[in-house]
Image (tube, rainbow, N blue to C red):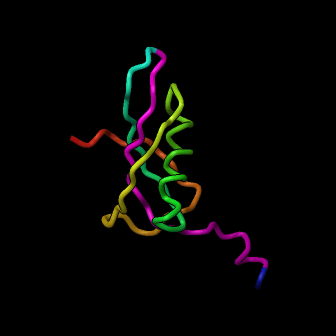
Amino acid sequence: MVLSSACRPEHGTPYRCSCTFVTDFDDDSRLDVEVCAPSEARAEGVGRGCAQTHAPGPVSGCTCRSAPDRGPCELSACRTTPAAP
C-alpha cells in the first residue's frame, strides 16, 4: 500500500506568471507561463525555470499570481499562455 502512494504525482497550486527576458537584440520582452508550484513562495522560481525553457534569451525575473479558477495540478506542469492584455 505504501508503494502505490509513492508512485502518484505530487500536487500543487497553479500560478500564472509574467516573465521578462532580453532578446538577441537587447530588447526587453515578456513571456507568460502557467506553472504548478508547491507554494506561493516557490512560484516565482518555478515560473522562471519554466519560462527559461521557452524564452530565446535569459529570463531576468517573473511575477506570479495564483490561478483560482484552476484546480490542483501536478508539480511538473509548465506551459506558455497567451499574453494578458
The residue positioned farthest toward the bottom in the image shown = 1
Give percent across and percent down for residue 49: 56, 45
Q: Nearer the viewer, residue 85 or 3?
A: 85
Identified at 59% across, 55% down, the residue is 76
Residue 23 magenta-highlighted:
yes
What is the quadrant of residue 8 in the picture?
A: bottom right
Quadrant holding the C terminus: top left
Give percent across and percent down for residue 42: 53, 61
Quadrant holding the N terminus: bottom right
What is the quadrant of residue 32 in the picture?
A: top left
Identified at 38% across, 53% down, the residue is 16
Is residue 49 placed above or below 23 in the rendered structure? below
Q: Is residue 47 left or right of residue 68?
A: right
In the image, the segment drawn in magenta is 3-24
Is residue 20 placed above or below 64 in the rendered structure? above
The residue positioned farthest toward the top in the image shown = 25
Q: Is residue 50 left or right of residue 21?
A: right
Residue 20 magenta-highlighted:
yes
Give percent across and percent down for residue 33: 42, 45
